[in-house]
Image (tube, rainbow, N blue to C red):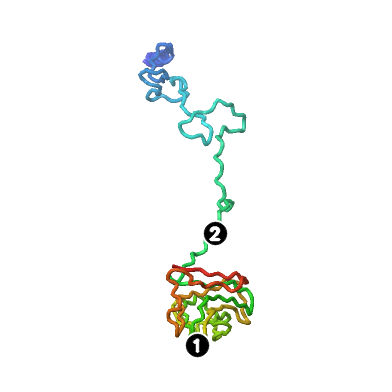
């Protein structure tokens, strides 16, 4: 009985070995992967197969494996061979320029347009660039008898070192500073009077600088009308022109401008 049991056990082991050592060509191909288009497995390894085992299929290529670092997805590797230690990295885009290096154009602000504070008036002006200067403007009154002259004018500049004065023939009126103490409202019509009994041939107006003037600019006075007291028809209204007023010299670039 003991010998029979040994022999039966030995026969089972031999039969099992014979079954495992069968011809590989006749073994079922359940663990083989196919990389051929149209095959049932479509390039996928069979269930339960282990890479590198006896029943695993041929190596399956993975698309894009070995792509160079930084290569955009969807691009293939280039044809250029890459040497050891190098990568086939596409060139970097040029860096944006530093805003501090960009020259920003500078546009000059145009000077504000000068608007006359009156219409139907005459602007008398001269460049005053030193102390004790004077520019005279006058018209021919025709030798009429008068008792005084009234100038209706607008003063656009406030200074106690600029003056104005009226004159008839060779007689000057009051020396008056163009100061806010006397004319607090700029560009507002005021009356400036010279009282004189005379036969008026030349009637005029003067502007200039006092002894402490430090500026260098064109100074203007706007004359709205001139009334010759005692001779009402000899005055000037400047409705259509400058009324014949002209500079009496060319010094300090005097100017007479009619503002319609």
Residue 146 image point, x, y percent? 48, 85
Q: Is residue 81 left or right of residue 61?
A: right
Crowdedness near tag 2: few (<14), some (14–19) or many (≥20) residues, C-alpha within 10 Å: few
| Mark in front: 1 vs 2 | 1
Q: Secondary structure at mark 1?
A: strand
Asked if 16 appears above or below 83 in the picture, the reply is above
Residue 176 image point, x, y percent? 54, 84
- Label at residue 195: 1
Q: Nearer the viewer, residue 233 or 2?
A: 233
Asked if 122 appears above or below 172 in the picture, the reply is above
Residue marked by disc 2: 108
Tell me which residue sits at (63%, 80%) in the image: 132
Q: Is residue 81 left or right of residue 20?
A: right
Q: Nearer the viewer, residue 228 or 9?
A: 228
Tell me the quarter of the image containing the C terminus.
bottom left
Q: Nearer the viewer, residue 233 or 32?
A: 233
Query: Alpha carbon of mark 1 to alpha carbon of mark 2: how far?
Result: 49 Å
Tell me which residue sits at (39%, 18%) in the image: 37
Q: Secondary structure at mark 2?
A: loop
Tell me the quarter of the image containing the N terminus.
top left
Tell me which residue sits at (44%, 77%) in the image: 188
Asked if 214 appears above or below 61 in the picture, the reply is below
Residue most extreme to the front: 143
Point out the tag, 1 or 2, that comes first from the N-terminus: 2
């Amino acid at each position: 009985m003991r010998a029979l049991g040994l022999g039966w056990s030995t026969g089972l082991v031999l039969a099992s070995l014979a079954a495992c050592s069968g011809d590989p060509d006749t073994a079922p191909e359940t663990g083989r992967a196919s990389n051929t288009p149209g095959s049932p497995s479509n390039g996928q390894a069979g269930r339960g197969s282990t890479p590198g085992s006896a029943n695993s299929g041929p190596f399956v290529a993975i698309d894009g494996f070995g792509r160079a670092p930084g290569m955009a997805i969807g691009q293939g590797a280039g044809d250029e061979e890459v040497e050891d230690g190098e990568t086939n990295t596409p060139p970097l885009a040029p860096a944006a320029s530093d805003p501090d290096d960009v020259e920003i154009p500078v546009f000059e602000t145009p000077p504000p347009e000068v608007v006359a504070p009156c219409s139907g008036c005459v602007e008398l002006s001269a460049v005053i660039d030193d102390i004790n200067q004077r520019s005279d403007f006058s018209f021919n009154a025709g030798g009429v008898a008068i008792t005084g002259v009234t100038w209706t004018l607008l003063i656009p500049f406030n200074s106690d070192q600029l003056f104005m004065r009226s004159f008839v023939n060779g007689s000057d009126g009051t020396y008056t500073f163009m100061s806010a103490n006397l004319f607090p409202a700029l560009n507002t019509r005021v009356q400036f009077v010279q009282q004189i009994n005379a036969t008026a041939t030349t009637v005029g107006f003067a502007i200039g600088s006092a002894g402490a003037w430090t500026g260098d600019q064109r100074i203007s006075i706007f004359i709205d009308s001139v009334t010759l007291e005692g001779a009402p028809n000899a005055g000037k209204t400047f409705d259509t022109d400058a009324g014949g007023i002209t500079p009496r010299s060319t010094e300090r670039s005097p100017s007479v401008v009619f503002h319609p």
